[in-house]
């Protein structure tokens, strides 16, 4: 510990890079906690649906959904989510948000959180990760 100052002076680029990367990692995880979304992998999503009667909520547009979607998923495009959110009755039911890559889900999670839904998950990587895991899709 007595040589820490000397190390920082001699390797200031490494120290700066460490601080920047650490803050980026912490801010991303903090942002996820504050936005109310919990990332979930494909295996965990299947387990959640099978064991806790979770719901796949596909927020892609209708055209995207009609091309391919997860079995028993409900199509509710992000553009119409605010208008149709009342059709989701059970606010304690686990909801797994599905989009193409996982980017649109943050906005949907915020809307669901504002409407008192308690168990909101985001499929990490979206439908792309579902395809990569070679899980079945329907059209």
Image (tube, rainbow, N blue to C red):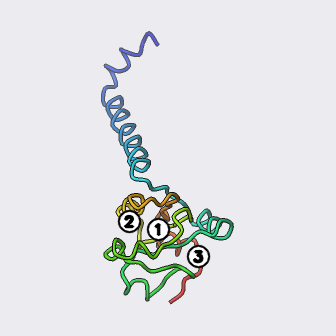
Given residues 44 and 8, the one toward you in this image is 44
Task: Provide the residue designation for mark 3.
Answer: 134
Q: Are marks 2 and 1 in contact (CB under 8 Å)?
A: yes
Residue at the top extreme, as displayed: 2
Image point 49% across, 79% down: which residue? Answer: 74
Please, what secondary structure does the residue beneath circle 1 have? Answer: strand
Q: Secondary structure at mark 3?
A: loop
Q: What residue is shown with label 1? A: 97
Q: Residue 116, located in which quarter of the rendered image? A: bottom left
Q: Residues within 10 Å of mark 3 (few under 14, many from 20)?
A: few
Residue at position x 34%, y 71% in the image: 82
Residue 32 placement (x, y as % from top left): 42, 50
Examine the rendered structure and indicate whether residue 137 appears above or below residue 97: below
Q: Position of residue 70 (x, y in %)?
A: 54, 79
* Residue of label 2: 108
Q: Earlier in the sequence, mark 1 or mark 3?
A: 1
Callout 2 environment at 10 Å: few (<14), some (14 to 19), or many (20+)? many
Left or right: 92 as drawn, with respect to 51: left
Q: Which mark is residue 88?
A: none
Quadrant hosting residue 51? bottom right
Asked which secondary structure carries label 2, the reply is helix
Residue 62 image point, x, y percent: 38, 85
Q: Nearer the viewer, mark 2 or mark 3?
A: 2
* Relative to 126, 71 lies left or right: right
């Amino acid at each position: 510990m007595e040589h820490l100052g000397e190390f920082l002076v001699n390797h200031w680029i490494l120290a700066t890079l460490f601080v920047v990367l650490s803050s980026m990692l912490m801010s991303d995880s903090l942002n996820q906690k504050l936005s109310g979304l919990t990332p979930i992998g494909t295996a965990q999503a299947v387990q959640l649906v099978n064991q806790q009667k979770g719901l796949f909520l596909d927020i892609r547009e209708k055209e995207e959904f009609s091309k391919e979607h997860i079995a028993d998923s409900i199509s509710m495009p992000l553009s119409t989510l605010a208008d149709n959110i009342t059709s989701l009755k059970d606010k304690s039911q686990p909801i797994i948000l599905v989009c193409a890559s996982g980017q649109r889900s943050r906005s949907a999670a915020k809307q669901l959180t504002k409407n008192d839904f308690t168990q909101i998950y985001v499929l990490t990587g979206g439908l792309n990760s579902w395809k990569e895991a070679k899980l079945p899709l329907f059209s």
